């Protein structure tokens, strides 16, 4: 398993930026069904800004990378997802402190911190058809894998699979938070864009670990 150092998180950021460039149109399409057709645009802008900022001044700790990405998302992306994603990453990064590498268990705690940040800021619960519907099962699967003796790479693969399933499971749900909730029952039958982008980001973590 690779070491969770700053270089690992920088490789994740590169993979995440690349996937937002590649899948942004699909995210925007999902958002056009139940939102305002900008989720892919938002994520693309935010991650490209984060990559640029980090290239200018590369952080030398995992916490520094996540805080830096969070800050860019907050300042460059408006709407719901910028503050939610940004605050989640910033708080997750802060929870890692200034250690030059972190353990898989510390990463779990950081992910839990991210879940708490989104819940607190957005007031959503699992089942409300938001990004939390991918985050919560993903963090649970990651923790359960570690508890049963899996290493980082295997645990992140489990997290990615669970995030994917969680995103797909938003299709039959009615949205209770965010713009999609304005549609009431008409939000049923569409996959949530934010849950989908979470699944892409966790998959980028899993691919980074696999190398
Ligand atoms: P906006 O809705 O402001 O245009 P985006 O389109 O970028 O922002 O992001 C929409 C996504 O944000 C939704 O698909 C949902 O996953 C997430 N979201 C919206 N409101 C909330 C909330 N209150 N809690 C958690 N996630 C939310
Ligand atoms: Mg939108
Ligand atoms: Mg918008």
Image: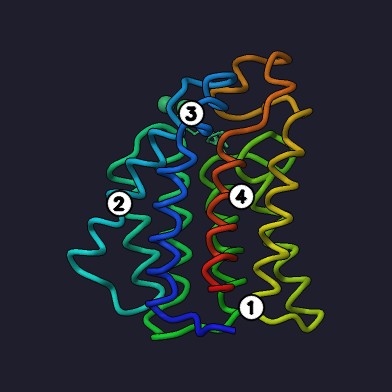
Query: Separation of disc 1 and disc 2 at Cα?
Result: 27 Å
Point out residue 150 in the picture as x, y percentages from the top left corner: 74, 80
Name the residue located 41 percent from the left edge and 75 percent from the top edge: 62
**Which residue is label 4 attached to?**
199
Assess disc 1: are there few (<14), some (14-19) or many (≥20) residues with their C-alpha within 10 Å of its C-alpha: many
Closer to the chain start, of discs 4 and 1, is 1
Query: Separation of disc 2 and disc 4 at Cα?
Result: 20 Å
Query: Separation of disc 3 and disc 2 at Cα?
Result: 20 Å
In the picture, the disc for residue 152 is: 1
Closer to the chain start, of discs 3 and 2, is 3
Relative height, residue 141 to residue 79 (above, below): below
Q: In the shown orientation, is residue 191 left or right of residue 15?
A: right
Residues under numbered marks 1 and 3 in contact, where contact means CB atoms less than 8 Å apart: no
**Which residue is label 2 attached to?**
72
Relative height, residue 114 to residue 125 (above, below): below
Point out residue 52 in the picture as x, y percentages from the top left corner: 24, 56
For marks 1 and 2, give the one nearer the viewer: 1
What is the secondary structure assignment of the residue under circle 4? helix
What is the secondary structure assignment of the residue under circle 2? helix
Closer to the chain start, of discs 2 and 4, is 2
Closer to the chain start, of discs 1 and 3, is 3
Name the residue located 59 percent from the left edge and 23 percent from the top edge: 180
Closer to the chain start, of discs 4 and 3, is 3
Res. 83 in view: no
Query: Separation of disc 1 and disc 3 at Cα?
Result: 31 Å
Residues under numbered marks 4 and 1 in contact, where contact means CB atoms less than 8 Å apart: no
What is the secondary structure assignment of the residue under circle 1? helix
Residues under numbered marks 2 and 4 in contact, where contact means CB atoms less than 8 Å apart: no
Point out residue 129 in the picture as x, y percentages from the top left corner: 68, 34
**Which residue is label 3 attached to?**
28
């Amino acid at each position: 398993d690779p070491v969770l150092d700053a270089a690992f998180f920088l490789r994740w950021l590169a993979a995440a930026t690349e996937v937002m460039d590649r899948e942004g149109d699909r995210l925007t399409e999902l958002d056009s069904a139940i939102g305002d057709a900008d989720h892919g645009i938002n994520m693309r802008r935010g991650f490209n800004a984060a990559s640029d900022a980090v290239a200018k001044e590369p952080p030398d700790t995992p916490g520094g990378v996540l805080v830096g990405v969070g800050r860019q998302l907050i300042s460059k992306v408006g709407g719901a997802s910028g503050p939610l994603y940004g605050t989640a990453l910033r708080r997750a990064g802060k929870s890692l402190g200034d250690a030059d590498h972190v353990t898989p268990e510390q990463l779990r705690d950081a992910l839990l911190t991210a879940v708490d940040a989104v819940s607190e800021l957005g007031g959503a619960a699992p089942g409300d058809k938001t990004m939390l519907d991918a985050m919560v099962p993903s963090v649970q699967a990651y923790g359960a894998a570690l508890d049963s003796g899996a290493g980082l790479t295997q645990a992140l693969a489990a997290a990615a699979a669970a995030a994917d399933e969680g995103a797909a499971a938003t299709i039959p749900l009615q949205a209770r938070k965010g713009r999609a909730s304005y549609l009431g029952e008409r939000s049923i039958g569409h996959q949530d864009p934010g849950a989908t982008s979470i699944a892409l980001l966790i998959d980028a973590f899993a691919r980074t670990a696999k190398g």
